[in-house]
Image (cartoon, helix red, strand yellow):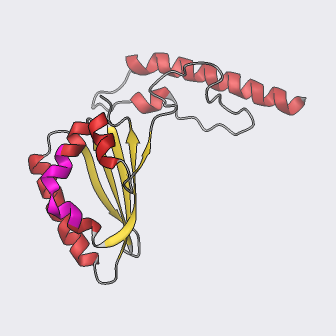
């Protein structure tokens, strides 16, 4: 089973903002108390509070179904406070696919990810014509400590060396391209 993410966007009907807020707090209390496979459940409001976005992340399809069952009528009441759209990201189970079939939720399945290798060189090859902004592995794995470091952290040293080589190779390629 794969993890499932959900993104919902709702534009509130006139006079429904406070009801949305109240119901969202109730939904959060239920999710915290009853859900066993919900990894993320967050509600965001636009600056003018005319729209909301809900970010959800579940261990698997069954966890999403559990969450929906736990919310029950509150979930339906939240949706009734506005109009919008929802997307599901991941590989839903057959049961979840059957439930979503013909409904308004669009499903997107994985294509490429930082977490999985590409299957072949022609799949989503990086474009050399785009500027590269790097988030190096050592930046993603850096940890904090109260001890004074004597050098690079063990997990970051290999990443730093690899990152430096990649940056130098990209820099040389970009300079070479400019000189041609």
On whether residue 67 falls in the magenta region, the answer is: yes
On whether residue 42 falls in the magenta region, the answer is: no
Predominant secondary structure in magenta? helix
| 26 or 139: nearer the viewer | 26
Q: Relative to 86, is 5 above or below?
A: above
Residue at (72% x, 28% y) in the render: 171
Q: Relative to 161, is 97 above or below?
A: below
The x and y percentages for residue 151 are 42, 20
Residue at (31% x, 42% y) in the render: 98
The C terminus sits in image quarter? top right
Q: Relative to 32, is 176 above or below?
A: above
The x and y percentages for residue 12 are 35, 74
The N terminus sits in image quarter? top left
The x and y percentages for residue 102 are 38, 52
Q: In the rendered image, is residue 38 in sight?
A: no
| 109 or 172: nearer the viewer | 109
Q: Residue furthest right?
A: 180
The x and y percentages for residue 106 are 43, 50
Q: In the rendered image, is residue 90 in sight?
A: yes
| 32 or 148: nearer the viewer | 32
Choose top left, top right, bottom left or bottom right for residue 148: top left
Choose top left, top right, bottom left or bottom right for residue 124: top right
Q: Is residue 117 left or right of residue 73?
A: right
Which contiguous range is marked in magenta? Answer: 66-76
Choose top left, top right, bottom left or bottom right for residue 77: bottom left
């Amino acid at each position: 089973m794969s993890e499932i993410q959900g993104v919902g966007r709702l534009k509130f009907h006139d006079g429904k903002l406070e009801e949305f807020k109240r119901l969202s707090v109730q939904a959060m209390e239920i999710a915290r108390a009853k859900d066993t496979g919900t990894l993320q459940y967050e509600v965001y409001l636009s600056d003018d509070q005319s729209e909301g976005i809900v970010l959800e992340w579940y261990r698997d399809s069954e966890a999403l179904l559990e969450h929906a069952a736990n919310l029950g009528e509150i979930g339906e009441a939240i949706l009734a406070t506005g109009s919008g759209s929802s997307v599901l990201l991941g590989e839903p189970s057959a049961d979840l696919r059957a439930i979503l079939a013909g409904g308004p939720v669009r499903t997107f399945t994985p294509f490429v990810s930082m977490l999985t290798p590409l299957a072949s060189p022609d799949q989503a090859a990086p474009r050399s014509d785009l500027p590269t902004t790097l988030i190096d592995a050592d930046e993603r794995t850096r940890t904090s400590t109260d001890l004074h470091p004597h050098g690079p952290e063990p997990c970051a040293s290999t990443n730093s060396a690899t990152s430096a080589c990649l940056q130098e190779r990209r820099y040389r390629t970009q300079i070479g391209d400019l000189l041609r």
